């Protein structure tokens, strides 16, 4: 007979060791409220009143400026979703829930979590377009730092809560694996050899994307300059915007390259199944902090809908960025498919399944 899975809360399952979680959730809520009400950015145009870029007012501002897509995405990912995510995390921690159902909801919000950073990349691009221009300029305000703190802490908390939820689910449905070493590149070789090749190609494409010029100002009376991710980093350094620089360097360069390195090493190194599972967990966590796709969406919005502020021209480097994003998604899809097939083969019947036979 199969045992019935009891509903329990993560708070009860973890016990007193989980006491920091509710405090951190409340801190995240406060940071989100402050980010919602405090100004992010102020844009100064010649002969016009300064335009305040508050998160709570930016939707109306963008809608009035006929930047409809930006307005909708800011509303969804920067205003509605962070609070919806916090509500889900509160429920996941305090409410009795089936472990499998809880994991499904948590995985769903984890997949969407990084897209809240889109507004930060929009701000960085707006700063770049107005940097050292005579007719337009911008000033950073404290709200952007509260927003970075709120979204970052929210993502860290969701990582912690998902990890705890996975352990709870595994304790209810334990799995045993074959004890021998497994070499991933030899398993399903007709497909698996593609993974290290794609990892190397993705690394090359990513480095090229960091240096490729993707945008150029194309407007009378404005200083015409080209932009790449590397140029954005130099600009943020000159402006001493260290928090935004860390976000840019970490999420577009360091973490994506680290993810590729771990994937490549794990794929060509024989390990037991528990080691492969640990490697997969680390790679999945790093993937949620790889934000070239989020940056790409912000760039698309600025290039297509931000022309009411500064007219720009898309350069060929944008296609390099798109290729790097595409290779990253293709690599992830193939690696997950091969790994799932391998896991199904390596998993031994758990005690519950054996009893039913």
Image (cartoon, rainbow, N blue to C red):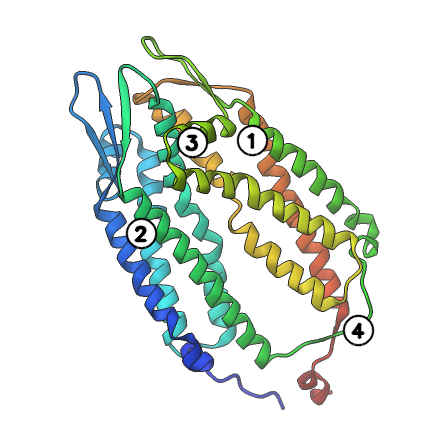
Q: Does label 2 or label 4 sit earlier along the sequence? A: 2
Distance CA(mark 2)–CA(mark 3): 32 Å
Residue 88 coordinates in the image, percent (x, y): 37, 65
Distance CA(mark 3)–CA(mark 4): 50 Å
Disc 1 element: helix
Residue 229 coordinates in the image, percent (x, y): 50, 30
Residue tagged 2 = 80
Is residue 195 toward the left or the right of residue 245 in the image? right
Q: CB under 8 Å between callouts 2 and 4? A: no
Question: In the rendered image, which quarter contains the N terminus?
Answer: bottom right
Q: Does label 2 or label 1 sit earlier along the sequence? A: 2
Of tags 2 and 3, which is closer to the observer?
3
- Residue 8 seen in the figure: no
Q: Residues within 10 Å of mark 2 (few under 14, many from 20)?
A: few
Q: CB under 8 Å between callouts 1 and 3? A: no
Q: CB under 8 Å between callouts 4 and 1? A: no
């Amino acid at each position: 007979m199969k045992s019935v899975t009891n509903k329990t809360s993560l708070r009860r399952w973890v016990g007193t060791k989980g006491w920091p979680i509710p405090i951190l959730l409340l801190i995240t809520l406060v940071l989100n409220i402050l980010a919602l009400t405090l100004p992010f950015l102020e844009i100064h145009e010649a002969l016009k009143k300064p335009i305040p870029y508050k998160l709570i007012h930016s939707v109306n501002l963008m809608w009035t400026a006929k930047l409809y897509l930006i307005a909708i995405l800011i509303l969804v990912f920067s205003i509605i979703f962070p609070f919806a995510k916090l509500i889900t995390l509160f429920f996941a921690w305090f409410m009795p829930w089936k472990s499998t159902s809880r994991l499904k909801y948590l995985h769903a919000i984890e997949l969407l979590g990084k897209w809240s950073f889109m507004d930060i990349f929009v701000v960085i691009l707006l700063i770049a377009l107005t940097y050292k221009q005579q007719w337009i300029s911008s000033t950073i305000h404290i709200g952007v730092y509260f927003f970075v703190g709120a979204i970052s802490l929210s993502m860290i908390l969701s990582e912690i809560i998902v990890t705890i939820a996975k352990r709870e689910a595994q304790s209810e449905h334990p799995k045993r694996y074959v004890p021998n070493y497994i070499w991933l590149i030899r398993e399903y070789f007709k497909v698996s050899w593609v993974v290290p090749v794609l990892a190397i190609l993705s690394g090359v494409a990513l480095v090229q994307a960091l240096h490729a010029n993707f945008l150029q100002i194309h407007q009378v009376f404005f200083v015409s300059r080209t932009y790449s991710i590397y140029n954005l980093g130099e600009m943020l350094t000159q402006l001493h915007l260290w928090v935004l620089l860390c976000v840019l360097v970490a999420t577009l360069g360091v973490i994506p390259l680290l993810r590729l390195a771990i994937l490549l090493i794990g794929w060509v190194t024989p390990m037991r199944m528990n080691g492969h599972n640990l490697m997969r967990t680390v790679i999945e966590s790093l993937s949620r902090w790889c934000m070239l796709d989020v940056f790409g969406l912000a760039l698309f919005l600025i290039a297509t809908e931000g022309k009411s502020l500064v007219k720009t021209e898309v350069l060929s480097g944008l296609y390099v960025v798109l290729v790097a994003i595409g290779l990253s998604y293709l690599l992830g899809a193939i690696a997950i498919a091969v790994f799932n097939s391998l896991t199904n083969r390596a998993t031994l019947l758990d005690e519950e399944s054996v009893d039913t036979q």
